[in-house]
Image: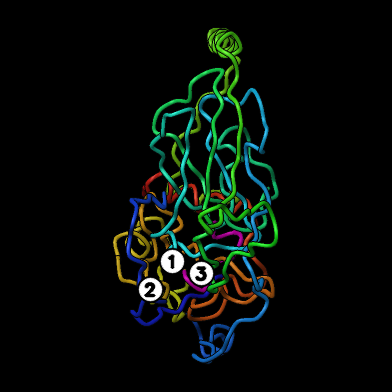
């Protein structure tokens, strides 16, 4: 059962001034209210890591023969605050060329590393993933270098641990980390394209998956499937949760989740189409390491009994990323 309480319309904290353009490109009856009670406003949620640590990157430093369409992923040990990305500083260069990139934040990894291939049944990164997607395809047989500065903060305000991981202090006194990798050669790229075209001609190539719709979330086995009872209190007309968030049908859910753009306690509406990280629905469904709501999320964690399965979280995030279609 997912119980939902509408929080006050107060942002979690002031938005950081944006220095770069970043696309950051989830009911109750009387007996149920105690299960969805708001916490003390002064309560501090325990269990967050004391520092933000960079765990790994994809590609790894020194990797070779990387796909030209890959994205650069940086995995952290805990969740990153999207409001801290206004000062995000990442640079992708090759020789004297600087590449324009789109930077997105995955609060949890709903894409596979590099953005390609199948997603496993378990997350490949325990925290958030910063992704850099070059706006133009990388060149074959070239060496690339990523410079990343530790200006991001964790969801609970954690700062980057500069003594853990690959951070180094530069001559100008600032800190950074670097990742170098090389793309596959032109002959390798040509061979890969020929193999892909041959598979397409023989019907062996899997077609691109269609966009996930809200109706699919209500389908058999989906997170809003009424037979799973994950959100039964939101489909019961007599429950207070139903008044807060109507999940009785895809059409009513679309109105409550997408069309209603009321700002929630984390400073974002319930769903921001194409931006899962900026959607309160995602914030509400995640938990800290002690199983409590994320810092600043008003109300009890949802679902209250057990965390939502990873595959369900991925499906909801991908629905939002695909445009939050009805």
Q: For numbered disc 3, what is the local secondary structure?
A: helix
Q: Is residue 226 visible?
A: yes
In primary-sequence order, the first of circles 3 and 2 is 2
Q: Disc 1 designates what residue? A: 280
Coloring scheme used: rainbow
User: Viewed as shown, does residue 54 lie left or right of 234?
Assistant: right
**Do residues under tags 2 and 1 come within 8 Å of each other at their CB atoms?**
yes
Is residue 18 on the magenta stretch?
no
User: Viewed as shown, does residue 227 lie left or right of 95?
Assistant: right
Q: Disc 2 designates what residue? A: 264
Foreground residue among 212 and 53: 53
Q: Residue, x 51% and y 69% (percent of image)? A: 284
User: Viewed as shown, does residue 304 lie left or right of 149?
Assistant: right
Q: Residue, x 47% and y 38% (percent of image)? A: 92
Q: Disc 3 designates what residue? A: 284
Q: Calculate the distance from the C-alpha at mark 3 to the C-alpha at mark 2.
A: 10 Å
**Do residues under tags 3 and 1 come within 8 Å of each other at their CB atoms?**
yes
The image quadrant that residue 265 belongs to is: bottom left
Q: Residues within 10 Å of mark 2 (few under 14, many from 20)?
A: many
The image quadrant that residue 211 belongs to is: top left
Over which residues does the magenta segment extend?
A: 223-234
Q: Calculate the distance from the C-alpha at mark 2 to the C-alpha at mark 1.
A: 7 Å
In primary-sequence order, the first of circles 2 and 1 is 2
Q: Calculate the distance from the C-alpha at mark 3 to the C-alpha at mark 1.
A: 6 Å
Is residue 225 on the magenta stretch?
yes
């Amino acid at each position: 059962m997912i119980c939902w309480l509408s929080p006050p319309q107060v942002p979690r904290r002031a938005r950081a001034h944006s220095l770069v353009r970043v696309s950051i490109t989830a009911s109750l009856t009387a007996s149920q209210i105690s299960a969805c009670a708001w916490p003390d406003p002064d309560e501090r949620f325990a269990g967050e890591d004391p520092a933000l640590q960079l765990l790994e990157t994809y590609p790894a430093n020194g990797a070779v023969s990387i796909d030209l369409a890959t994205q650069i992923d940086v995995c952290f040990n805990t969740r990153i605050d999207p409001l801290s990305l206004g000062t995000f500083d990442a640079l992708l260069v090759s020789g004297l060329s600087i590449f324009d990139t789109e930077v997105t934040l995955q609060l949890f990894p709903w894409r596979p590393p590099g953005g390609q291939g199948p997603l496993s049944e378990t997350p490949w990164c325990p925290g958030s993933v910063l992704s850099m997607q070059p706006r133009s395809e990388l060149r074959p047989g070239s060496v690339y270098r990523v410079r990343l500065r530790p200006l991001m903060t964790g969801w609970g305000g954690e700062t980057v641990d500069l003594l853990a991981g690959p951070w180094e202090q530069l001559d100008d006194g600032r800190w950074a980390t670097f990742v170098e990798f090389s793309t596959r050669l032109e002959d390798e790229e040509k061979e890969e394209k020929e193999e892909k075209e041959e598979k397409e001609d023989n019907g062996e190539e899997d077609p691109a998956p269609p966009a996930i719709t809200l109706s699919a979330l209500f389908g058999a086995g989906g997170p809003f499937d009424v037979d799973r009872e994950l959100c039964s209190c939101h489909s019961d007309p007599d429950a207070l949760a139903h008044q807060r968030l109507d999940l009785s049908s895809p059409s009513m859910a679309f109105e409550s989740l997408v069309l209603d753009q009321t700002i929630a306690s984390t400073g974002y509406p319930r769903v921001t189409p194409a931006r899962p990280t900026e959607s309160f629905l995602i914030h509400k469904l995640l938990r800290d390491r002690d199983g409590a709501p994320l810092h600043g999320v008003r109300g009890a964690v949802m679902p209250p009994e057990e965390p939502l399965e990873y595959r369900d979280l991925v499906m909801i995030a991908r629905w939002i990323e695909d445009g939050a279609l009805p």
